[in-house]
Image (tube, grey):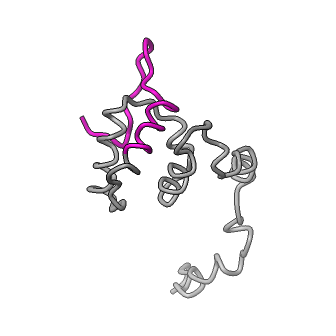
Amino acid sequence: MRGRIPLGALLGLPLALGPLAWPERPARAQADTAAQPAETPEVLPPGEAREDVFYACTACHSTAVIRRSRLSRQQWDDLMDWMAEKHGMNPLEGEQRRQIVDYLATAFPASSGRRRAGNPFLTD
């Protein structure tokens, strides 16, 4: 058994090293978090359904996903179905859906001119 390290010693090694083996958070991750705006409705542009959008959407993801998306009204509407079907979002219906989709299409319209990468949430 000469030259072999017992398995128990190997398994216990990370525990013995403590914070040296697993730092709590890298400094870069802490800086990235500090640079992000607070997640409140005010990070979204003003509009009639801003708070509805904020609370409906941030139940599953941050506002960064919304703020970087630029879609047509039809694409925003299709996205509501996709999220309900693929990710279990509570389906939006009636007037609430119309207001949310109208807000998103107005506040985050499809880019014109410059071609952008496709939205990762939609499959073409």
- Which residue is drawn at the image coordinates 36% and 32% (left, top)? 73
* Horizontal side, residue 35 vs residue 14: left or right: right
Q: Is residue 92 positioned above or below 21 on the image?
A: above
* Rendered image quadrant of residue 116: top left
Q: Nearer the viewer, residue 87 or 80?
A: 80
Q: Position of residue 68 (x, y in %)?
A: 52, 35
Identify the residue at image location x=47%, y=34%: 69
Foreground residue among 49 and 26:
49
- x, y percent for residue 113: 43, 11
5 vs 92: above or below: below
Dominant secondary structure (helix, strand or loop) of the stretch shown in magenta: loop
Q: For this rendering, which residue is in front, 13 or 116?
A: 116
For the point 43% across and 37% down, which residue is it? 102
Relative side of 61 to 90, left or right: right
Q: Relative to 23, is 110 above or below? A: above
Tell me the quarter of the image containing the C terminus.
top left
Residue at x 35% of width, y 54% of height: 92
In-front residue for pair 58/26: 58
Does 80 appear in magenta?
no
Relative placement, left or right, of 57 versus 90 is right
The stretch of residues the image draws in magenta is 98-124
Decide whether residue 111 is among the magenta residues: yes
Q: Residue furthest front?
A: 95
Residue 29 in the figure: left or right of residue 122: right
